[in-house]
Image (spheres, helix red, strand yellow):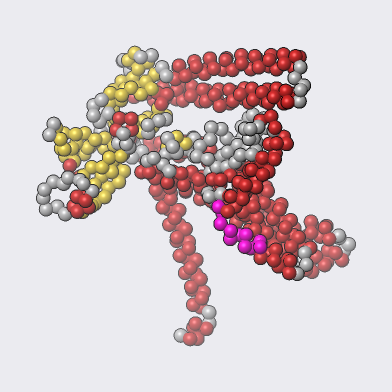
């Protein structure tokens, strides 16, 4: 045994076991996130439960079976639930998603299996995904067009035909409101700031006043035209409605402008369910969040995460590489250099919230406030850059990940043989040419390693972003077709913050739980995708320059 331990074999097996456990844990996390998140988009069957709870007669409950638990009699009695007499020591409790929030008051309801006298899956149960008030369950009782009932038609087919038309009108209305009218509002603001600047400089004469007045009148005319067009589109959108009979037998009039999708889950085949699942995933990736982030998509958060990571990478790489080059190639091995290296390593262990506080004070208030005073005085007291935004978030995370890039780059520089530098200098190259043509290309894989680590950490940060730019919801993205196209002063959404917001700040935790898993799984995929891209570049550079050191 002692000889076997001395041979080193136990350490090899221990290392292999540790790697296997790590891989199993990673695979388990991914499967958990994917399984819990992706099933949210699958069209689950909708049940109709008949209950014998009331002296007035049976009670009907319609909804999805969200969760099923077996609880003891003692637990249920402690919760204040009245139980039937008998010898049963445990009961099955159902958590049913009943939707219809405007009439039910909440999305979920609990039932005891012992209270259910009949459980069926009617094929004509309709599920509505709405812009507000969550999901609705019931039976299609009719349709209205301009307040008049539609007759002599297949109502289900008419509903499926009208929804794409309403969606097209909604997209047109959205483009008018958030693109064309936003562009005119920006022109109004630019005109106001120019007039204010001219007044401050005492240059606003009658000719300029008349010119500004004429421009303002033209903008008002264009705005009125768009407002009239938008009003017409909204009128067309509100023209059609459907009648839904809920589980209490009450009829609800729901405008089709509020309906995003409608389907009959109990009548769908496997192929239809798969197509519906793919469509729901596509909407999740391309739509904006709704209902306090408990429904809808995550596209603004995806866009904000990727944009912030790209800006952070553009900032952190040059500074990290330059700092590593100075420390390794130019600075002497003295006490000051050793202290700087210790400080760099210690900075990597500083809590991220400290960086957020520093970014808020230094980048936002000091630098941003100075920029406003120098370049945007006409906008004051309303800040332009003196408020949290995507630029300050990127700079804060660049500062946070800078030690990682410095350490990784310096480690790569130390692996380059000194003979290559000496040979280059001996052949007549200057020190700068040696660094540019020999050292930096060979250290590029190490730089990419630092970038990979920086991206992985920046994409998952939450605490500092809450102070320097991330918000719960944004009306517009930081990039649009309005000059200057990239608006670095705007606030943005981030996947990690959205996960936190859905998990801990949501008014309906149960409703948001599947989206928490789906968003977390998406964040992992984005981080893995960015890392794979960086690893591909690193591998290409490594293969290109590996023969230089041989």
| Residue at the spot 36% in from the left edge and 33% down from the top edge | 135
Q: Determine whether 435 is above or below 493 in the image.
A: below
Left or right: where 301 falls relative to 187: left
**Residue 184 sits in quarter:** top right
**Magenta span includes 345:** yes
User: In which quadrant of the rendered image does the C terminus lie?
Assistant: bottom right
| Residue at the spot 72% in from the left edge and 23% down from the top edge | 199
Left or right: where 249 falls relative to 264: left
| Residue at the spot 45% in from the left edge and 34% down from the top edge | 290
Q: Which residues are magenta?
A: 343-353
Q: Looking at the picture, how far across and down is residue 431, in whole percent?
A: 83, 61
Q: Looking at the picture, how far across and down is residue 396, in whole percent?
A: 62, 49
Left or right: where 116 falls relative to 409: left
| Residue at the spot 11% in from the left edge and 50% down from the top edge | 86
Furthest toward the bottom, the residue is 2
Q: Main secondary structure of the magenta part?
A: helix
């Amino acid at each position: 045994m002692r000889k076997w331990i001395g041979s080193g074999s136990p350490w090899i097996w221990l290392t292999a076991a540790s790697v296997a456990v790590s891989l199993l844990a990673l695979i388990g996390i991914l499967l958990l996130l994917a399984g819990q998140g992706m099933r949210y988009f699958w069209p689950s069957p909708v049940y109709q439960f008949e209950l014998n709870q009331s002296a007035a007669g049976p009670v009907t409950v319609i909804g999805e079976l969200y969760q099923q638990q077996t609880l003891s009699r003692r637990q249920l009695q402690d919760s204040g639930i009245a139980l039937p007499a008998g010898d049963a020591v445990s009961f099955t409790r159902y958590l049913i998603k009943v939707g219809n929030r405007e009439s039910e008051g909440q999305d979920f309801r609990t039932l005891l299996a012992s209270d259910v006298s009949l459980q069926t899956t009617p094929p004509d149960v309709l599920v509505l995904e709405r812009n507000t008030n969550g999901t609705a369950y019931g039976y299609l009782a009719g349709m209205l067009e301009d307040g008049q009932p539609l007759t002599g038609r297949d109502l289900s087919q008419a509903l499926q035909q009208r929804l794409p038309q309403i969606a097209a009108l909604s997209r047109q209305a959205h483009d008018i409101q958030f693109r064309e009218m936003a562009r005119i509002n920006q022109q109004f603001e630019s005109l106001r700031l120019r007039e204010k600047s001219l007044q401050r400089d005492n240059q606003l004469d009658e000719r300029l006043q008349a010119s500004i007045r004429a421009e303002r009148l033209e903008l008002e005319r264009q705005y009125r035209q768009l407002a009239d067009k938008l009003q017409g589109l909204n009128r067309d959108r509100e023209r059609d409605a459907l009648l839904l009979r809920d589980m209490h037998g009450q009829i609800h009039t729901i405008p089709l402008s509020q309906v995003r999708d409608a389907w009959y889950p109990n009548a769908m085949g496997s192929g239809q369910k798969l197509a519906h699942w793919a469509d729901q995933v596509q909407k999740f990736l391309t739509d904006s969040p709704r209902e306090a982030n408990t429904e809808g998509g995550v596209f603004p958060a995806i866009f904000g995460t990727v944009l912030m990571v790209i800006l952070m990478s553009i900032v952190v790489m040059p500074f990290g590489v330059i700092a590593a080059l100075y420390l390794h190639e130019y600075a002497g091995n003295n006490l000051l250099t050793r202290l700087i290296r210790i400080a760099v390593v210690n900075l990597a262990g500083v809590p991220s919230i400290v960086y957020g506080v520093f970014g808020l004070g230094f980048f936002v208030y000091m630098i941003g406030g100075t920029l406003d005073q120098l370049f945007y005085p006409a906008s004051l007291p309303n800040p332009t850059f003196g408020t949290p935004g995507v630029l300050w978030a990127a700079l804060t995370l660049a500062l946070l990940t800078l030690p990682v890039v410095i350490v990784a780059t310096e480690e790569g520089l130390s692996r380059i043989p000194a003979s290559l530098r000496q040979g280059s200098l001996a052949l007549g190259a200057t020190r700068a040419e040696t660094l540019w043509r020999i050292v930096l290309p060979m250290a590029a894989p190490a730089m990419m390693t630092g970038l990979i680590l920086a991206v992985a950490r920046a994409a998952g940060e939450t605490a500092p972003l809450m102070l320097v730019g991330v918000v719960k919801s944004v009306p517009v993205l930081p990039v649009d077709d309005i000059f200057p196209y990239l608006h670095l002063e705007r606030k943005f959404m981030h996947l990690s913050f959205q996960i936190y917001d859905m998990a801990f700040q949501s008014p309906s935790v149960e409703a948001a739980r599947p989206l928490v898993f789906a968003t977390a799984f998406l964040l992992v995929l984005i981080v893995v995708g960015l890392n794979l891209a960086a690893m591909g570049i690193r591998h290409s550079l490594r293969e290109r320059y590996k023969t230089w050191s041989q």
